[in-house]
Each structure stands twice: as C-alpha cells, then as structure tokens.
Image (cartoon, rainbow, N blue to C red):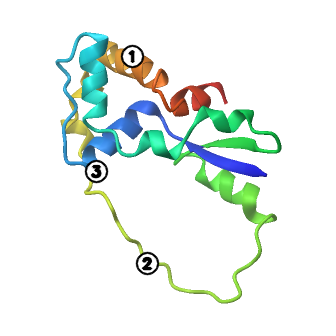
Amino acid sequence: LELHVPCRDPIDHLMSMCNAVKKKIDCSAKSAREIDAAIRGCEVFLSSRFSLRLTNIKNIHLKCFRAPLKINEYIHYMGNRLEQKSFETTYVHRGTNRKREKENECIWKDKNYMKKVRNRMIQHKSGYYKFCRDC
C-alpha cells in the first residue's frame, strides 16, 4: 500500500493554520516553551492526521510530494495510475480559509524567529515536518 503525503513548508503551513482559526502567531515568543505555545495556538488537527508510526508498518510505503508547489508533478505521477471518471462534472471551488495577507504576517519579517519556529515545528510530536524534511 502506498500512502501519499503532501509536504508543506512548515512556516507557510503554520500561517495557513493560523489563518484557518483566525489567530495571529505570537512573534514576541522567545523561549522554546513560548514558541511551542504560539504554534499550539494555531495547530489544526495535525497530530491526528499523521504519525511517524506509519513508517514502521510492513507493506506500507509513504510517498511524499511537495505541496502545493509541485501539484502538477503529482497529477502527472498519478495520471496513469488512476481510472478515468465515468462522467465529467463541473468543478466547484469550496473555499475553507479566508484569503491570507502575508504582508501582515509578522513571522516573514524576522528570519531568525522564522528559523526558531521551523526548528520547533520539525520537532512536533506528530513527526510530520521531520518526515517531510527527510523525504
């Protein structure tokens, strides 16, 4: 069984989650504990969506792909593996998040803070960001 894992940039993913829950990241957090609290304030179901234990299950192979930047490569990869739809339908976009305004997200203005947050996210208990970094 091959499971496909879309891997997002940790910072962009965090900011997307903050946007989804209508919160701003605390860019004044300094210690690892404060940064972890800032991350938890935005986290949306991450621990229930991925587990590194999947990498240890026999007959399961995890395949990562960079999302959303490499989505066309993924579609190409899947193109000859999926059956064609028996009938075509019109695509209707169902937006879930409000539009982000990156210029108003404080994290992008401080590279040092961004590095600290990225390092904390790679240590997240789900293992998602570590898996994606190593994939």
Residue that badge 3 annotates: 20
What kind of residue is marked 1?
A: Lys
Of badges 3 and 2, the one in the foreground is 3
- Residue 114 locus on image (x, y percent): 34, 20
The label on residue 115 is 1
The label on residue 35 is none
Horizontal side, residue 79 vs residue 52: left or right: right
* Residue depicted at x 19% and y 41%: 23
Horizontal side, residue 76 vs residue 46: left or right: right
- Residue 13 locus on image (x, y percent): 40, 39
Q: In this orientation, which residue lies closer to the viewer: 3 or 110?
A: 3
SS type, badge 1: helix
Residue 115, quarter of picture: top left
What kind of residue is marked 3?
A: Ala
Of badges 3 and 1, the one in the foreground is 3
* Residue depicted at x 56% and y 25%: 130
Q: CA distance from mark 3 to mark 1?
A: 22 Å
- Residue 101 locus on image (x, y percent): 23, 45
Horizontal side, residue 132 vs residue 57: left or right: left
